[in-house]
Image (tube, rainbow, N blue to C red):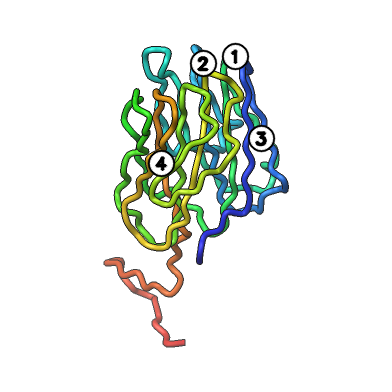
Amino acid sequence: MAITRIQKKDNSASTASTVTVTLDSAPTSGNLLVATTAFRSDSAPGTAPDGTWTLAEAIAPGTPSSVRSEINIWYKISDGTETVTIWTLDSTGYIGACVREYAGANVLDVTADAGAHSTATTHSTGTTAATSVNDSVAVAAVGINANDPTVSWTNSFTELAGNRTGAATASYHSADKILTATGTQESTCASVSAHGAACIATFSAAITTEGVVVLTDEPTTGVTLSDE
């Protein structure tokens, strides 16, 4: 089953402690929700709306303060109630968040990150191991410590526009790519300004055991085999 991005919504805030992302419609229960977030603050890292979100990949704030963005990729299986999500900083800072809904995927597969903040104007996500199945989606996120309203991504990743923090000193972007074959995944974000970091996570289609016979060494006493 091919994976489809159903919807996405983003929001950002400067000198704030929270940012709210409101989807255009309630997500379908059982679909995959992926959120990419970037936080820039001198306080503790940002947090997800609640404990039902799982952190797939993250880059901690760097040093010095000019490279202190934190970039996270979160995910969860929707229960159909997440139209509104609130992302939080422990104190005032710059926040950007993008939430998207995918149909046809529900398993975290492989992840990678750049390993450290870079002072260059290109920011690689790092390269993942090979994806496990053909049908997957790769999600990338970058945080840049400057106001870069326009960036570009390599390897056919699609920019999900509008992910800026609204501040002159921080911006945030994310991108995705629907995959139809296995392989390693990487994208490099090119920005006007230096100082930033990126990461990536892939999510695969559900893998079922329907029609698969699992052989074990358990005794078969009392088991009748039938060709029905």
Q: Identify the element where label 2 is drawn.
A: loop
Write down the residue under mark 1.
92
Amino acid type indicated by mark 3: Val
Please tell me how crowded label 3 is: few (under 14), some (14-19), or many (20+) other residues with Cα within 10 Å.
Answer: many
Q: Amino acid at mark 2?
A: Ser
* N-term-proximal mark, 1 vs 2: 2
Please tell me the numbered disc located at residue 213: none
Residue hosting label 4:
200
Residue 222 vs 53, above or below: the answer is below
The residue under label 3 is 21
Which residue is at a point 42% across and 48% down the rendered structure image? 202
Snapshot quadrant of residue 221:
bottom left
Left or right position of 90 against 117: right
Q: Position of residue 83 (x, y in %)?
A: 70, 42
Task: State if disc 2 and disc 1 touch (CB < 8 Å).
Answer: yes
Would residue 34 be found to the left or right of residue 179 on screen?
Answer: right
Badge 3 or badge 1: first in the primary sequence: 3
Q: CA distance from mark 2 to mark 4?
A: 22 Å
- Give the CA separation, mark 3 to mark 4: 21 Å
Q: Which residue is mark 2?
A: 41
